[in-house]
Amino acid sequence: MRLEIGKINITDIRFAEESKIENGVLYVNAEDLKPVVLEDEKIKDVCFDIAKPGESVRITPVKDVIEPRVKVEGKGGVFPGWVSKVDTVGSGKTLALKGMALVTAGKIVGFQEGVIDMTGPGAAYTPFSKTLNLVMVCEPVENLKQHDYEAAVRKAGFRVAAKIGELARGIEPDDTVVYETLGIKEGIEKYPDLPRVGYVAMLQTQGLLHDTYVYGVDAKKIIPTIISPTEAMDGAIVSGNCVSACDKNPTYIHQNNPVVEDLFAQHGKTINFVCEIITNENVYLADKERSSNMTAKLCRMLDLDGIILTQEGFGNPDTDLIMNCKKIEAEGVKTVIVTDEYAGRDGMSQSLADADVAADAVVTGGNANEVIILPKLDKVIGTLDYINKIAGASDKTLREDGSLEVELQVITASTNEMGFGTLSAR
């Protein structure tokens, strides 16, 4: 598959009477966007706000982060299975609004929504303090069940992101990057001397409110399968979960997966980037065994020399992570794990809930239990009503002076397990 990503650099966001992109500025008419959100009767009201890097602004509770895009050539459209039909994406040309994001927020759903600080010490830990953020704060109707509320906000976010992305249609991109994968036989013939490398992405699927979707299908219902990495880059995988904010993969990170980007950067030079394998993270032992068995089988069938393995979440998924690692290694395929740690506030506890001698090459995104003080900021987009309940907080989090004592766990993407962040260790 050959995919062109045309990058349109957004340098500012402003509210205006007309929604448009002009000279790098995104102008937004919020009143035009409201009907797009409110077409779902589960959402009572919505308001839009703007948060820019360096401003004294805190966004919480954060649910998802999405990069607006529009498909201008090739099969399919944006967010297949949600906004567009389920045609296979990953080829043709897609325009992406770079430097900005749509952030969805609102009342708490699963006690694991996050915080994005646009300035101060917390800003250093989240990649989304560097983006211009259009924030969509949704108010649910009364007595709405949590999973229905999550679904309503998730779908509304995709609709709004698609609406904004359409503004880019017809605009000449500032830069264009081409990503291309070859068929199995063609790749072997073209790169006979390069190691065959794959990427195994574990998708969060551990029950209600712990969902990831592939072409609109809840990944709990899939068995491990092969996709082109360009499909994931083109919106085939989206987030629908409420795992801890620090290592959650928002939709934005699936769209801009740094593992995929880095493997493509070496494709044809030092490696032959063969494919992406997607698998799920399960609750029951039999399901964990089935998925890890099939993942290892696919690695062997493809004659891979090595893979990079990423997970989402912690604790229970650590078992899936280690199962995948040791079984893939047993097939003779070298494996590198990308994860994060829950090593206690003092860093002295066991970092992962499971371990094996096969896991001898590990990249860490940091210790999510590390404590940080977030100072009071001038403005809150969303609400602080639930800040003491978010995972990584406590009943003492909101202090008398308005500052927050929290673990990194509350900060969106602070210890991201795809490496979409700034933390690591040696």
Image (cartoon, rainbow, N blue to C red):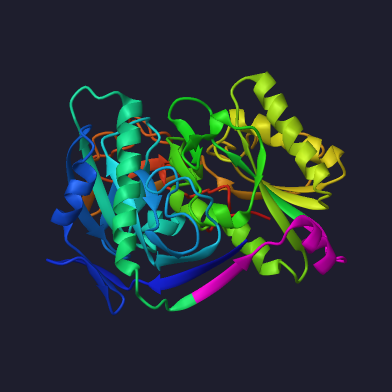
- The image quarter containing residue 90 is bottom right
The residue closer to the viewer here, 391 or 33, is: 33
Q: Position of residue 102 (x, y in %)?
A: 33, 55
The residue closer to the viewer here, 52 or 401, is: 52
Q: Position of residue 6 (x, y in %)?
A: 46, 71
* 177 in the magenta segment: yes
Range of residues picked out in magenta: 176-196
- Relative side of 242 to 362, left or right: left
Q: Position of residue 54 (x, y in %)?
A: 31, 65
Q: Residue at x 18, y 44 (%)?
A: 46
In the rendered view of the protein, which quadrant contains the N terminus?
bottom right
Report the number of discs: 0
- The image quarter containing residue 156 is top left
In this rendering, the answer to whether 200 lies above or below 207 is below
- Relative side of 23 to 378, left or right: right
- Relative side of 392 to 385, left or right: right
For the question of whether residue 388 can be seen, the reply is no
In the rendered view of the protein, which quadrant contains the C terminus?
bottom right
Q: Residue at x 65, y 64 (%)?
A: 264
The residue closer to the viewer here, 312 or 150, is: 150
In this rendering, the answer to whether 124 lies above or below 302 is below
Q: Position of residue 25 (x, y in %)?
A: 27, 73
In this rendering, the answer to whether 418 lies above or below 138 is below
The residue closer to the viewer here, 158 or 149, is: 158
* 334 in the magenta segment: no
For the question of whether residue 332 can be seen, the reply is yes
In this rendering, the answer to whether 90 lies above or below 372 is below
Q: Residue at x 54, y 50 (%)?
A: 88
